[in-house]
Amino acid sequence: MHDTLPADMHLWHTLERTVKAVFASYGFSEIRIPVLEKTELFARAIGDATDVVEKEMYTFEDRNGDWLSLRPEGTAGVVRAVLQNGLLYAAPVRLWYIGPMFRRERPQKGRTRQFHQVGAEVFGAAGPDIDAELLAMCQRIWQLLGLNNIRLEVNSLGTSQERARYRENLYAFLNDNRDSLDADSLRRLERNPLRILDSKNSSVQELLRDAPVLADYLGEESVEHFDGFCSLLQSFDVPYQVNPRLVRGLDYYSHTVFEWITSDLGAQGTVCAGGRYDGLVEIQGGKPWPGVGFAMGQERLVELMREQSEPPHEVPHVYCVMVGAGAIDGGMKLAEQLRQGVKGLRIQSNLGGGSFKSQFKRADRSGAALAMVLGEDELQQRRVTIKHLRDRAGQEEISLDDVESWFQNYLRMLN
Ligand code: ATP
Ligand code: MG
């Protein structure tokens, strides 16, 4: 579990500001749900035989004997929340969320035990139009963040009946070829053979080349849904590849599944994943409302932003240098007045006194472009000295009456 340090904050803020604006432009509303839920919620929604529920959740018994888990993902909690709060009366409902998730995985690059997701969920829309709109929305987010080299893979998982029939045949095939399976795949074989399609083991992948393909088991309606989805992607100018082995790790998906993957982050290259989960609301005790959504991994996106397009770090515009008791009083007050009067101005006041020399050193370290200097002389003459720290523009003296308009003008010139 990592700390997010001040030097990285501008990346996180840029990401969060961007997704918020894009969600609003597609008519999505934010929902905030608890970090802790009953364990059974995740067991039922995500599936007992998934890695997440089997071995990755942080689970404990509280003082009442209730089993609780830190949320490993957002969808189950959002479904619970919309049912509990009666939000589906206005279906279709478009929601988004942001926040920490917890999975006890083996930590490695791009994989932490507390990570952060931005996600979207739409309830009450069964057609492929919304599936495609979600992906157009993701693409818009990548564009606004200046990210490229993220490819989209899509697949259809059909209905649960179609999948069950496929599962039987896949099981039979894999069971006949047990010798080629690794320990992990053998463990999955009995409980969840579809997960073997996801295996990273190369000899397993070799074997899978001859395995039955899910697409051959899809009925007419499923094929129609998937074709509709693909042609909408084309009309939205969202490039994609069909990956017939894409299955996703959680049990609740049906029909559309997708992943956005980059080769710029090494092995953990999936930055966003999701799909349709038409059975999930019913599993949680609601009517059979269809649902579809995705979750993006914020850590991986931040890493990609750093690789591809680092936005400027938000340093202060001005560092306020104040020497002498009177100057400190006057300077702190002046800084307050400027924050109030000059919208968007970022001022950092010097703390703990010190000589001009030591304060200028701190001003330099703060990254500010300007120092606003108040000493005894300035105080007496009711003026400040503005010193340019990053270029050779030197310094200028400004009467206290003009400081506010000087900074207003300064910001105008910057933008
Ligand atoms: P992976 O195949 O990488 O384990 P997943 O299928 O378990 O991903 P999802 O549950 O679909 O992931 O979560 C959506 C996104 O959240 C992932 O694509 C990834 O960007 C991010 N994510 C998932 N687990 C982690 C983690 N442990 N650390 C950092 N990011 C994560
Ligand atoms: Mg995972």
Image: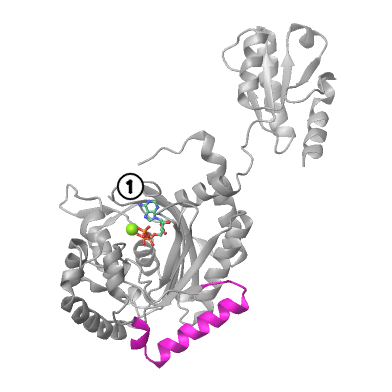
Q: Percent from the top left, x then y, of residue 250? A: 32, 67
x 74%, y 35%: residue: 342
| Residue 271 x/y as whole percent | 46, 58
Label the magenta part by its dominant secondary structure: helix
User: In front: 143, or 178?
Assistant: 178
The amino acid on which the numbered mark 1 sits, given as a three-letter code, is Arg
Residue 140, position as x, y percentages in the image: 60, 63
Identified at 62% across, 79% down, the residue is 235
Outermost residue, bottom side: 220
328 or 273, which is in the foreground?
Answer: 273
At numbered mark 1, what does the secondary structure look like: helix, strand or loop? loop
Tell me which colouring the rendered structure shows.
one colour
Tell how many labels.
1
Relative horizontal placement of residue 293, taking residue 208 as reference (left or right)? right
83 or 150, nearer to the observer: 150
**Residue holding disc 1:** 113
Residue 68 in sight here: yes
224 drawn magenta:
yes
Residue at the image position 38 percent from the left and 60 percent from the top: 74
Residue 257, by quadrant, is bottom left
Residue 284 appears in view: no
Q: Does the closest atom of ligand 1 sit within 8 Å of the Cβ of label 1?
A: yes
Start and end of the magenta stretch?
Answer: 214-240
Q: How many C-alpha atoms fall within 10 Å of the one at disc 1: few (<14), some, or many (≥20)?
A: many
Residue drawn at (27%, 73%) of the image: 207
Q: Is residue 199 magenta?
A: no
- Classify 353 as above or below 243: above
**Quadrant holding ligand 2?**
bottom left
